[in-house]
Amino acid sequence: MIKKLPNFLFFITSFSFAQDAEIFKPDSVKKKIEATPITTNLRIDGVMNDAEWKLAKPVSNFIQIEPYQGKQPSHKTEVRVLYNKNYLYFAIFAGDSLGKKAIRATDFKRDFSFRQHDLVALSFDGFNDKRNAMALVTNPYGVQRDFLSFDDIYYDIDWDGLWRVRTTRTDSGWVAEMAVPWQTLRYPKTDSPTQNWGFNVFRNRRLTNEQTAFSPYPRSFTNTRMAYAGVLTNLQPPPPSTNVRIQPYFLTTFDRYRNYDNKPNTNTYKLGGEIKWAINPNAILDITANTDFAQADADRQVNNVTRFSVFFPERRQFFLENASLFGVGVGPNEDLSGGTMRVQPFFSRRIGLDDSGNPIPIDVGARFVYRSLKRNYGAIAMRQREVGDSPGTNFFVGRYSENFGKQNRIGGLVTVKNRPDGTNMTGTIDGFFRLSESHSLNTMAVYSTSTNSGKSGFSGFAQYYYSTNQFKFWWTQSVVTKDFNPEMGFVSRSDVVGTTPGIFFFNRGKWIPFKKFIRAFEPGIMTEFYHQASTGKLVERQLNINPIWLNFQRGGYFGYLINPTFQRLTEPFVPLGVYIDNGEYNYVRHQIYASTNPSAVISLNSSFEWGTYFNGRLNSHDIRMQIAPVPHISILARYNRNHFRNVGNLAHEANGESYVDLYSVEGRFALNPRVQLIGFYQKNAENLSQNYNIRLSWEYRPLSYIYVVYNHREFDNLLDKPTQIENHVIAKISYLKQF
């Protein structure tokens, strides 16, 4: 079932599985791909016409994962592997009877959406620990996607490796050639000159949503569940050596302000950069000075009508790398299983950003990470500059976890935020236990204390999952006390005890009608109960009943939900400017979610909600349309409206209505995957703001960039004051060199 559709390669398209497909155990006899040594360097152009490729031993015996687990693929995929002293080379031929006509790709965005592209993916387990994986992914246009995976649960999606790929498209399919420097890969130093690594290759033919893999695994898992991987044999990599990657930058900014008090226009110049030192295959040290995040994608505004705080994801590259080691916590999964409650003792957006998302300069910082089969540990230390009313602040995060068994771990995390007016600290103990292929348990307990207020608080959770090819069941129990205050973390609401069990059913029986169009029927129930921790009283109850959810063969879906809800407001609630007083409220809401094929030239994604809301009614709709006539051009338009009628204070006004609209347009125009113009515009009626951001990006050599950014922000919700306007122009050049 998909409620919020995943944008990651490693999530299966629909989480819906055939009734006769079981969760099988890894095969004791592993499938093998043999790498062939060469002495020359290959030209990476996606043509595969170098004579050396004839020396490689092709492998093409892939197995279908989706839609028919274990069956033979409908189209051939062939893999060849070569290597020399500098690079590990891959050539993948993705055969297709329709040739270029079958190819689907909607944009040239790095870390592109899995649901919108044809792709092939390589996953490596250089240490053969069956827990850690490095994944390198490309689409038919040579766009890159890469990430790190740990236990097929925790992911560093925004990790960017240094590797090269080129592709060509033909009438018989498409070809990808990859050159991966040995320095990018992670593997042990051994006495034997030859190594064998855990390895898998995954392909998605997007036209028919057929997914295949070299080494098969149950479709409720992903290609980074390395216990199911095959073996890449006959490798003779150079001994891993200490390597250093430096990335200095130069930046200039022009800042202009209108209708601000005591905020002058400025022109500034900055020098800074980062150093990444791979001390050994297990340990990496990152150092940053005068840190800049000009290239980071800007936040999109969200109109929130729930009692939960909005969680804005981290978008800054320095904090995204190795985020999974420090990112312990609980939150909703991409398919909305697990419950709405989110608690993270460490949230990197608390560093270098104020509560409104405005940047605060970072003078210097460092991150050290060590990962091995037995244990993982790391630390982050940052110094945030004093600016205006914001004093200079020191941040520290320490993390340790011990692995045991096949995929179990226990660990701890400490955060310290120190300012002149006091110190906030948290201490966390957490654990993850994979009880079997289908059973898992995730737990955490956090204590917080603040010296300036003298208050302390507690938070904890336990989350159990049971997932098979037929259904998915979970139970999440969480608690957050009233005085729990992790100033370096995130909590969606406090003074609450949450109980959120639920179940999804996955049906693909022959009884489902219109099998040519419908792939799966996936009803479910998601329940949420929240009691006030300080009094024990029930403050919210939601019964999210999902009697209809259809996943279509081409990737679209249709679902209907009904949500009987109880709310006890212990203090006033003000969603989008509508004042709702204390009291008890019972209401029922209805929801429809629908999407067409997201890989089509024109695709629609929409949600409609209607029904009672507290003491009145609320009708909401969110419509998104993407137009991508060619991958070089992609335009996404969105319209969101919330229409309140007789809700809260509106019940005493003449017309009793309020409309809050949010419009946005995003565009991506690319010459190729390395030269792109990206922009977006948003207008929000809730705070009468208009914001737009335009960014020209040129990757003139691997992971070295030139950026020109224009950012406009305005606010018009201040009484008796003219509209406040900010304009920022930023030009930045960075250069990456690996030694």
Image (tube, rainbow, N blue to C red):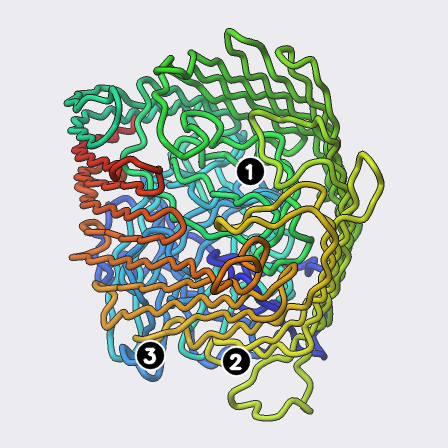
Task: Give the residue displayed 17% in from the left and 39% down from the top.
Answer: 708
Disc 2 versus disc 1: nearer the observer: 2
The numbered mark at residue 324 is 1
Q: Residue tagged by mark 3?
A: 102
Residue kind at label 2, given as amino acid type: Phe
Residue 321: x and y in percent read 45, 35
Identify the image quadrant of the N terminus: bottom right
Considering depth in this image, is 363 or 605 the residue closer to the camera? 605
The first of marks 2 and 3 along the sequence is: 3
Q: Which residue is mark 2?
A: 552
Q: Residue at x 27, y 56 (%)?
A: 52
Image vertical order of residue 498 relative to residue 365, above or below:
below
For image coordinates 65% across by 60% down, the residue present is 615
The residues bearing labels 2 and 3 have C-alpha atoms spaced at a distance of 18 Å
Residues at circles 1 and 3 in contact by the CB criterion of under 8 Å: no
What x and y, as percent, mark residue 556? 48, 76
- Whether 395 is drawn above or below 486: the answer is above
* Horizontal side of residue 719 vs 676, given as left or right: right
Foreground tag (1 vs 3): 1
Residue 62 in picture, x, y percent from top left: 51, 70
**Residue 672 drawn above or below residue 320:** below
